[in-house]
Image (cartoon, helix red, strand yellow):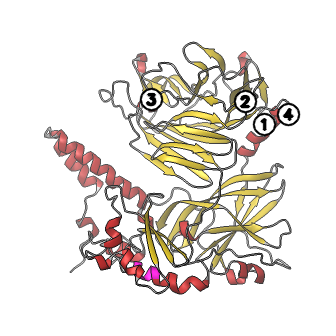
Amino acid sequence: MAQIPYNDRTDGVVDKLRLLQTAHAAGDHDLAMSLADSIKDTLSFERQEASAADPPQIGASEFAPVRELPGGWAAWAAGWKFYKPVTLFETVGIARGGEPVDIGVAFRADQITDPVREIRVATTDTTGKVLLEVPCQVYDHSRRGNEHHCRLVLLADVPMHDRAVYLIFYGNANAELPNYASDLSTTGEGYGLDIENSHFVARLSRQMGQLERLTYKRQHGLELYAGGKGHGEPPGIDWAHDYVDPGHFQKFRMRNWSDCRNFEIVRGPLCVRVRRWGFPHSPIHPVFTPSRMHIDQTYVFYSGVPYFLKQGRMDMVQDFSIEAMRDDEWVFSGYSFTHKLWIDATGKLHEGDVPAGGTENLWGVGFYHDASRDAFIALWLDHSAEKFDGISHGGVPTLHYDGHGQLWSRYPASQTSFQAGASIRQTNAYVASEFPTEGAAAEIEQLRHRLLHPLEIRSEKTERISGARAAGALARLSETKEATPVKTAIWKALGEVRDEQLYNIKSSIVDLGYVYDVRLRAGVATIVVTMPHRGRPVHEFLVTQGGGRVEDGIRERVLKLPGVREVVVQCSWNPPWSTGRLSENGRRDLGLPV
């Protein structure tokens, strides 16, 4: 059968916009709504295929063969073919321990199959002679032509004014999804999550993903919450972002969302990211649905640290005017704190009232309790604007606001007009920890200084190490060469299982990226699969009827193999399937550019 071009099997945004305009003009609102949904689906695909906005910090050409490592190290990393050296530099004189580092990395497509499954990270012990594996997390995997791109998170230890070398290993067909022990755990579905580490538990709203409650894991377990009647939305402690339109007619808020139409979730042992974006809603939505200020907000939680981040943007897509806007407001009922804190433009922490001359140039605010020593402090790391002058860095904290409790509200702009293209951005860290009786100011100031000066990331060749030796091995039980015959046979068998709903393509579920992992323990093969989208949740379809007949499914094919006595098939939605998982054959069969 002749190959039908990809564009003949689907419709692009331009065509759908034309159809939408025609349907709208004809008064066919039902069809128009269906087309609007279809346009969004197409945009979701195009977004997966689009080039990354930022170039990777470690390029695809920056690598070396594992065999070139010192003998002991090469033996320790047996099974992995390549490594990328990464050097982290500490430049401001603050020793870093367990410092979250997020690195953009690219790999040649002919050297790696699945970065999430294959990547391992190692560094040396205190002697500098022995390699030790370091927990890591891979997310945001995509295919860019002949390269795989991803983000890599690790927790780094670097002495002050010094450096540390980390090695990224990859290229092991037997590799299994790593399972690292961590204090960071996540429960829930979608954006309605509970995120816990050794310092706190954060609960996000099941309705729209805003931070709803924060429970400390020290002493009596302080719980920060917002009570009262509110404004009709579910109560929560994070109230930004919003704006008031001209004449104080109404307020448009993210918190008015009935659900999140646009969101991304990253879940893992080292990092959880919850990103939501869209236009804020009117209190009488959908009567008023202006598309003027686009809001993008991300929470980032890490393992082992007493703070979390919020990154936000407010982008103006049209010329328009506002009475006021807020980009950081926190409300706490119950009067959990007794003292106010604030940080001036030089980074110094102060207690008490903000002087009249400094109210519009704050770079952090917060509270603490003089008896429990519980504290909640915002460290404003970036608060900047493009195509807009006069941004205000206000947000004076108050210990009592009638009907609400304790709060601060930052208004970056009031009674002003924006031009299309203007943008207000922020990055904040929120510290939920003890406020020591001694040295608290210096500790908070140093944390802010540290966050403002992250470790520098460079790709540098490793030095030859005299006396380098091995202790143990990087490979798990069935990641070694001894497991290669059985593992290879399993992957080959999976490469013969098809998704019969794609009637006339040769690509298997491996080429289509449905298979996340193959684990082998004492003859039991555990195979982790996904489906392309949640409209197809019945993964058992692949287990016993992969090609329309029982004998063509995963379980039956793998059970026939020598060395396999049982097969367990599990389905996972994390990470969500994307086109980055397609092999070259898969892309070619679907008509996508290779």
Q: Which mark is residue 439?
A: 4
Pointers 2 and 1 in contact (C-beta within 8 Å) = no
Question: Considering only order in the chain, which callout, 3 or 4, is on the residue closer to the N terminus?
Answer: 3
Question: Considering only order in the chain, which callout, 2 or 4, is on the residue closer to the N terminus?
Answer: 2
Name the residue type under label 3.
Arg
The answer to whether residue 495 is seen in the rendering is no
**Magenta stretch in the rendered image:** 490-494
Name the residue type under label 2.
Asp
Name the element at disc 1: helix
Residue at (60, 84) in percent of width and height: 481
Distance Cα–Cα, label 4 vs label 1:
10 Å
Pointers 4 and 1 in contact (C-beta within 8 Å) = no
Dot 2, how many residues are within 10 Å of its Cα: few (below 14), some (14-19), or many (20+)?
Answer: many
Question: Considering only order in the chain, which callout, 3 or 1, is on the residue closer to the N terminus?
Answer: 3
Pointers 2 and 3 in contact (C-beta within 8 Å) = no
- What secondary structure predominates along the stretch shown in magenta? helix
Question: Considering depth in this image, is 291 or 369 the residue closer to the camera?
Answer: 369
Question: Where does label 1 land, which residue?
Answer: 445
Q: Which mark is residue 253?
A: 3
Q: Position of residue 257 (x, y in %)?
A: 40, 33
Name the element at disc 4: loop
